[in-house]
Amino acid sequence: MREITGTTRIYGILADPIHHVKTPQVMNALLARAGIDGVLVPFHVAPDGLAGAVDGLRRMRNLGGFIATVPHKTAMLGLCDEVAPEARLVGAVNCVRRDPDGRMVGTMLDGLGFVAALRACGEDPRGRRACLAGAGGAASAIAFALAGAGVAHLTVVNRTAARTDALLARLRAAHPGLSLATQAAPGHDLLVNGTSLGMRPGDPLPLDASLLADRPFVAEAIMEPETTPLLAAAEAAGCRIQRGRPMLEGQIALMAGHMGAL
């Protein structure tokens, strides 16, 4: 580990739980390769302490910014002083820059990272039929990124009907020609888990296993465990898969750039 001094710029990641995050390893390797005197560290913050934590971080003059992940992305929208238009549309923030005057400026990069990872695997979303589990912060970002990348159809499956309806309303307003549905049926080319289901032992599958019969490409947003129950079932069914870490790697340089590290 390189030396940390009084001039080292600090960056963070806020999560609850925190043990599963891979961002410190990936971001710190990027900073080291670029010769940046900075370090990203994990901050374990529960939802009831999020506002207080952000207020404290605002006062840290050597803080460049932080990344927000589960379960803080949606709540972070209301804690920033300024939010990028794409984050406002998605309804969530996952990366925040602290300006010298203490202003917190948020953006959302999950979707861009996810689509970049898909394309790196040779899976161009354009013209595909996609089914997405989830309507929270990460899932909403993925939904808008898939729509922007030209999917022909998007099914959103989520346990909370009100949240699903709100996401579909925003998608219709931004992409009026996009075919949308809320009931998953066979015939999708791409299955995506944008929920936290699979992080904990005993979690149910986020999508019905019958959808794997057509051998779609199956992608995860979860990074720990590396092989979730959904990915294990997909591999057993003969599907090609994408683990969660490529989504982070697809956006890590964008995150560093937004926080002023690069």
Image (cartoon, helix red, strand yellow):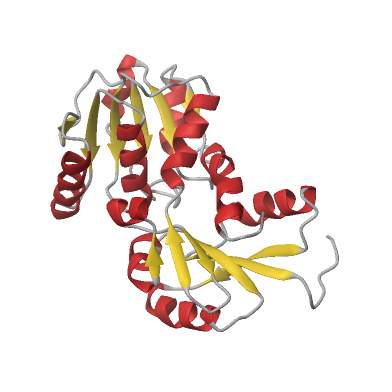
Q: Left or right? Give the position of 244 relative to 168.
A: right
Q: Position of residue 194 (x, y in %)?
A: 37, 44
The answer to whether residue 79 is above or below residue 39 is: below
Give coordinates of residue 262: x percent, y percent: 67, 54
> How many numbered marks have been drawn onto this rendered protein structure?
0
Residue 206 seen: no
Question: Is 246 located above or below residue 186 in the figure?
Answer: below
Instruction: Name the foreground residue: 164 vs 9.
Output: 9
Foreground of the two, 39 or 132: 39
Left or right relative to 249: residue 143: left
In the displayed image of the protein, which residue is found farthest to the right? Answer: 3
Residue 151 visible in this rendered orientation of the protein: yes
Vertical position of residue 22 compared to residue 126: above or below: below
Q: For the N terminus, which image quadrant?
A: bottom right
**Residue at x-position 56% and y-position 84%:** 59
In screen coordinates, is 74 left or right of 20? Answer: left
In the orientation shown, which residue stands out farthest toward the front? 101
x, y (%) of residue 84? 39, 57
Depth check: give the residue in front, 138 or 112. 112
Q: Please give the name of the residue rendered at 73% of the width and 64% of the height, measured from the top-left corner.
A: 38
- 138, 225: nearer the viewer: 138
Q: Where, by quadrant of the figure, is residue 94 drawn?
A: bottom left
Q: Position of residue 175 (x, y in %)?
A: 21, 36
